[in-house]
Amino acid sequence: MAKRADKRPDHNYRRKLRYLMRVGALPHAVGLHHITVYHDAWCGIYQRKCCNCSPDIRLAWSQPDAARN
Ligand SMILES: [Zn+2]
């Protein structure tokens, strides 16, 4: 992943997505995957700031063969 030019902290949901990918909790297969991120009501994302909550991230559905060129 490219290094960010600025020093802003990363969104928590992005950090959590990377973690879930790393531990194999999210699919690596080519295809169409729908992931839902549930932020807490007080999360900074709603004030156009960084996500600073611990969001619930769920795989809603997966269509591994849905990729098209
Ligand atoms: Zn959040």
Image (spheres, helix red, strand yellow):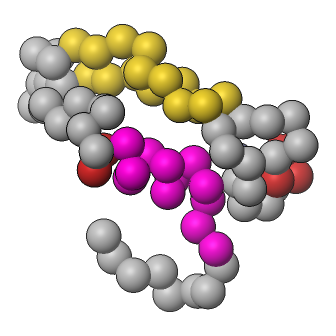
State left or right for residue 46 relative to residue 13: right
State left or right for residue 24 relative to residue 56: left
Q: Quadrant of residue 59?
A: top left
Relative to 30, is 3 above or below?
below
Residue 45: x and y, percent? Answer: 76, 49
Q: Nearer the viewer, residue 49 or 19?
A: 19
Residue drawn where x is 58% and y is 86% of the image? 6
State left or right for residue 38 relative to residue 26: right
Q: Magenta region: which residues? A: 9-20
Residue drawn where x is 57% and y is 48% of the image? 13
Residue 68: x and y, percent? Answer: 12, 24
User: Where is the N terminus found, in terms of image quarters?
Assistant: bottom left
State left or right for residue 30 relative to residue 16: left
Q: Residue furthest front?
A: 23
Q: Quadrant of residue 31?
A: top left
Residue 51: x and y, percent? Answer: 71, 53
